[in-house]
Image: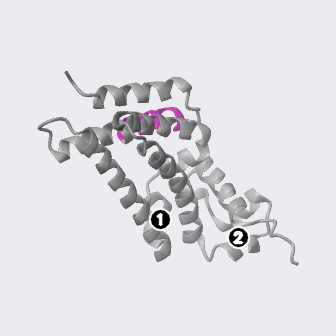
C-alpha cells in the first residue's frame, strides 16, 4: 500500500487561496503555491496541469462552499425565513472563511476564467445556474400581489446578495474581519426589503 500524498489538492488549493486573499489572484503562481505549501514544485504540477487549472480550483472551491450554504438557507420552509437566512449566511460564511470570501470579492475574469479548462468552466456555469434558479424560486414565493417576476427577483437579489456582499467588501477589503453586528444588519435589511407590507 502506497503512502498517502503529503501535498494533496486540498493542501495546495488552501495555500493558493491564502496567497490570493493576501495579494490577489496575480500572486497565485505554481512556484509561489509550492513555496506557500512547503511543497516541491513538482507536486503542484502533478495535481494541476497549469496555472489556469489552479486558479479555477481556487475560485471554484470558494464558490461551491459559499453556494452550498446559500442553498441550505434557501431551502427553509418559510420563504421569508429562507431569504433572511440566506442574507445572514453571506456574512456568517465570510466571517468564518475570510480567505475564501476575499477570493469571491474578485471577479471570474481576475481568476482568468476564459483560460480555465472546459470542465471547470462548465462546473462554474452549472453552479451559477442552480443558484439563479434558487433565487428565482425564492422570488416567486415572496412576490407581492400584483408584483411582476422581474421586480420580485430584483428585491430578492438585493436583499440576499447585493447588500450582504457590500457589507462583506467593506469589512474584508482592507484586511479586516466581519463583525457579528454586520450579520445582524444584513438579516434586518433583508427582512425589511422582503417582509409583506400591510
Q: What is the C-alpha distance between the residues marked 1 and 2? A: 18 Å
Query: Which of marks 2 and 1 precedes in the sequence?
Result: 2
Which residue is painted at 43% across and 39% down in the image? 86
Disc 2: which residue: 44
Crowdedness near tag 1: few (<14), some (14–19) or many (≥20) residues, C-alpha within 10 Å: some
Residue 11 falls left or right of residue 87 = right
Magenta region, residue range: 162-173
Rendered view: 124 above or below 2? above
Q: In which quarter of the image is the C terminus?
A: top left
Q: Tell which of 75 and 176 is nearer to you.
A: 75
Q: How many labels does the image show?
A: 2
| Residue 197 point in image, percent of width and height | 21, 24
Task: Give the number of the disc on residue 136.
Answer: none
Q: Label 1, on which residue? A: 112
Q: Considering only vertical position in the picture, is 84 above or below 102?
A: above
In the image, is 108 to the left or to the right of 18? left
**In screen coordinates, is 49 left or right of 91?**
right
Q: Indicate whether residue 161 is drawn in magenta.
A: no
- The image quadrant where one finds the N terminus is bottom right
Secondary element under disc 1, as helix, strand or loop, is loop
Main SS of residues in magenta: helix
Residue 95 lies, in percent from the top left, at: 58, 36
Question: Where does the image place residue 135, in percent across and percent down from the top left?
Answer: 33, 48
Which of the pair 28/192 is nearer the observer?
Answer: 192
Looking at the image, the residue that sits furthest to the front is 77
Amino acid at each position: 500500500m502506497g503512502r498517502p500524498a503529503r501535498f494533496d489538492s486540498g493542501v495546495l488549493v488552501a495555500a493558493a487561496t491564502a496567497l490570493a486573499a493576501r495579494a490577489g489572484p496575480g500572486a497565485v503562481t505554481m512556484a509561489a503555491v509550492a513555496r506557500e505549501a512547503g511543497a516541491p514544485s513538482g507536486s503542484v504540477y502533478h495535481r494541476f496541469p497549469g496555472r489556469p487549472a489552479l486558479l479555477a480550483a481556487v475560485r471554484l472551491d470558494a464558490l461551491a462552499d459559499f453556494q452550498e450554504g446559500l442553498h441550505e438557507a434557501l431551502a427553509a420552509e418559510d420563504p421569508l425565513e429562507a431569504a433572511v437566512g440566506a442574507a445572514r449566511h453571506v456574512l456568517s460564511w465570510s466571517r468564518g472563511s475570510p480567505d475564501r470570501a476575499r477570493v469571491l470579492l474578485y471577479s471570474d475574469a481576475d481568476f482568468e476564467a476564459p483560460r480555465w479548462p472546459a470542465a471547470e468552466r462548465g462546473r462554474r456555469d452549472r453552479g451559477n445556474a442552480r443558484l439563479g434558479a434558487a433565487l428565482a424560486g425564492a422570488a416567486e414565493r415572496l412576490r407581492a400581489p400584483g408584483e411582476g417576476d422581474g421586480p420580485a427577483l430584483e428585491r430578492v437579489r438585493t436583499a440576499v446578495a447585493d447588500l450582504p456582499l457590500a457589507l462583506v467588501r467593506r469589512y474584508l477589503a482592507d484586511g479586516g474581519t466581519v463583525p457579528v453586528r454586520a450579520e445582524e444588519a444584513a438579516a434586518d435589511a433583508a427582512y425589511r426589503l422582503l417582509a409583506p407590507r400591510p
